Structure formats: structure tokens, C-alpha cells
Amino acid sequence: MNIIEIKNLSHRFSDGTWGIKDVNLSFSKDEFVIIAGKNGSGKTLLMRHITGLVSPTEGSVLYYGKPVDSCLEEVRRKIGLVFQDPDSQLICQTIEDELRFGPENACLPEEIIQARTELIIKILGLEDKRLVPPRNLSGGEKRKLAIGSVLTLEPNMIILDEPFANLDYPGVVNVLRLLLELKDKGHGIVVITHELEKTLAHADRLIIIENGKIKEDGDSREVASKAGKYSLHPLDFTSRTFKEHTWLVS
């Protein structure tokens, strides 16, 4: 069964305009998906529907077959959301406190909280900085910590909104490496971005949204060459090797 199934989803704003219209999509585990589109295309609005932050005007969003609005608490634990600006998501005084925050608010037993915190801080490679304030981290480290803060709730799927914004090359590589490790561990990964060149070689599927409508949805290699039709950078898998002009994880 799919983690998320979207059926005939539409959202009308208060001024009468449609933000998204007649969207049908599904997302499964072990899948790395990119949702791409120009600014204002409806990418972030779609993400907010998946996580139950807004309600549809028409249609439905299902989590394992149940309407999202009927199981919001579970959805918000099991679908991790990482915002574009990590500073808006990091609220605690230390890295360790940040990782403990979610499980503590979920009222999990202390032994589980501690075990998950230790596991995630090791995965993030921040063991020697556990008492450092998040504000003192680099941009890439903040992004990793924001991802780690949702991992402590053991989500089935993680949605990231422009995860590479304002990162230098090492920051991009570090975040991308973490995402690929999470996919290998069985997490569904959904990246919302317009920077295809940084992730496309590693994605299973590429969805292109324009003016609130799904225009393309398929194998990343097949859809990539069509990106130019939607004012995105088209990437050609057939010329030379795609890896020669893609951000890689070595």
C-alpha cells in the first residue's frame, strides 16, 4: 500500500484563484522522488496538503488509506517535514536537546528517547558537537540537524523543501549523502526543488508541476529531458555520461 495517495486534489485561495488543480499522485516507501517546478507552481502548497497543514477545497489526501485529517497526529509523526529555512525549525539550546524534542513531546519512554538520540547524532556525524547551540552550526550542519530532528520520530517518509538552498558544495554533498543513506534504510524521500542538477542522478522519479497541475510524472531519466518546456534546466542522460555534470556523492 502507498504511504500517501492524492486523489483529485484542488485548492482554491480566498481570492478565487486555484493554487493546485486536479492533482493525482501516490508515494511509496524506498522511493526517492523529486517534485520540480518554477516558483509559484504549487510545489510547497502540495507539500502542505500532504502533511495536513492545509485542507483541500476538493479531493482528498490519504495516509495508508485513511484521510489525513482523520489521523493528523500520526501523519505529523510519520511524515517528516524539513522546511527550506532550517533556522525556522531549530528551537532548542543544544543539538542534543533538538534531537530529543520530538520524542519527548510524543511522550516516549526515556530509554527510547536516549537510544534514538544517540543513533541519530551518530548518523549525522555530530557526536563531538552535541552541546553546541544549533545557531553556531554551518548551513549544511543546520540542514542535517533539521533532518535529524524529524528522524527521531522514525518517519516513513521525509519531505524536504529546497534542501540545498544557500548551501556550498560540501554542504550539498553532505545533505545528499544523508538522504541516500535514509533511502537505503527504507525511508521514502520527497525533495521539492527547482535545482534538478543536484539530485536527479540519484532520484527514481521526477514530477514536474506547473500552474498547480501535474505536467510530467515518471522515471527521472525520461522526464529530465523535458524539463526545458517548463522553464527548468533540462538534463540529458544520453550525452557523454550524466555523472559528468551532476553533483555527486563520492
Image: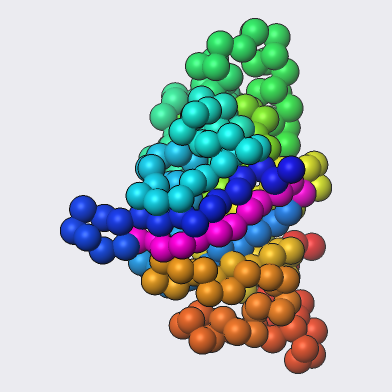
Please tell me whether residue 27 belongs to the stretch shown in magenta: yes
Give the camera-side residue of 41 and 236: 41
Q: Position of residue 137 (x, y in %)?
A: 50, 41
Q: Position of residue 114 (x, y in %)?
A: 67, 15
Q: Position of residue 175 (x, y in %)?
A: 63, 52
Above/below status of 136 relative to 58:
above
**What colouring does the structure picture have?**
rainbow
Q: Residue at x 45, y 46 (%)?
A: 49
**Residue 201 visible somewhere in the drawing:** yes
Left or right relative to 250: residue 125 = left
Q: Position of residue 139 (x, y in %)?
A: 50, 50
Q: Residue at x 73, y 37 (%)?
A: 123
Residue 90's image quarter?
top left
Residue 224's image quarter?
bottom right
Which region is colored magenta? 19-30
Q: Residue at x 70, y 46 (%)?
A: 2
